[in-house]
Amino acid sequence: MSAANASNAALPISAREIIPEKGVLVAARRDLALAMRSRGELVQALAFFVICVSLFPLAIGPESALLKRIAPGVVWVCALLAVLLTLPRLFQSDYQDGTLEQCLLSPYPLPAICLGKMLSHWLTSGLPLAVLSPVLGLQFGLGGSELMVMVVGLLLGTPVLTAIGAIGAALVLGVRSGGMLLGLLVLPLYIPVLIFGAGAVEAVLAGVDPTANLYLLAALFLMALVATPYATSAALKIALD
């Protein structure tokens, strides 16, 4: 056995496996497994999104011009609210059963664990919303180009909603009426995502290039990807102190 192999073999397993990227995968895989065991919560958020969007065409009637005009805002607001409904499950159960304290003692960096939990949350909430949005957009008479831009915008914007919401969910841990406080904290921060996401579809409807709005959503996505795991981990440490 070479000296390098002997040195690696002598290291404890936990020390050899401290890789931030692996911490992301471990946390995401665990949360996905837990989410699959409680599919009812996932279905509730999707059902809320579908029902809320579908109510508007029923209430307004078959006025195609008006339906097209309100479609971007309706879909984005309903998607925003559906994501907001799912935010408490990001950390609440782990906080109650003591898992978060164990995360602080984990060999993996806490920001990596937070990023993994955000990834799992997006895969079970934001991604299904983006997949369902073209079907719901047909109710408003949107065409292929408008639906495509809507899906791209949701794929870029919903991760930002999850990332911002994760900070708020961490800050309100253990607080009474935390759900109401969470909404008050994150809804103002969701406004830029809402404006750029709905604005991209409105640009297509107006015959304007939507890439500026999509680029801004992509910039928000990259900033959230880099900054929010560290902000969330700091908020969790405050909540657990």
Image (cartoon, helix red, strand yellow):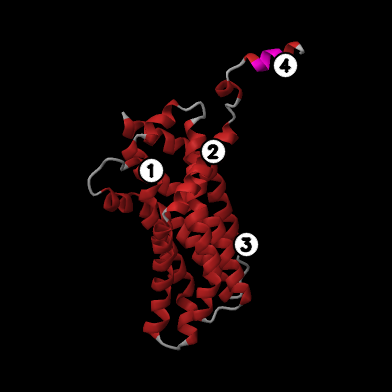
Q: Is residue 177 magenta?
A: no
Q: Bounds of the magenta span?
A: 5-9
As drawn, is 59 to the left or to the right of 174?
right
**Image point 32% across, 50% down: which residue?**
182
Q: Amino acid at mark 3?
A: Thr
Q: Amino acid at mark 2?
A: Val
Of residues 104 and 177, the one nearer the viewer is 104
Mark seen at residue 211 = 3
Spatial CA distance of label 3 from label 4 is 52 Å
As drawn, is 12 to the left or to the right of 60?
right
> Seen from this angle, which residue lies furthest bottom?
62
The answer to whether mark 3 and mark 1 are in CB contact below 8 A is no
**Image point 52% across, 68% down: which residue?**
132
* Crowd rating for badge 3 (residues with CA inside 10 Å; few <14, some 14–19, many 20+): few
Q: List the residue tagged with mark 1.
A: 91
Mark seen at residue 5 = 4
Q: Amino acid at mark 1?
A: Phe
Q: Secondary structure at mark 1?
A: loop
Mark 1 or 2: the one toward you? 2
Q: Secondary structure at mark 3?
A: helix
Mark 1 or 4: the one toward you? 4
Q: Amino acid at mark 4?
A: Asn
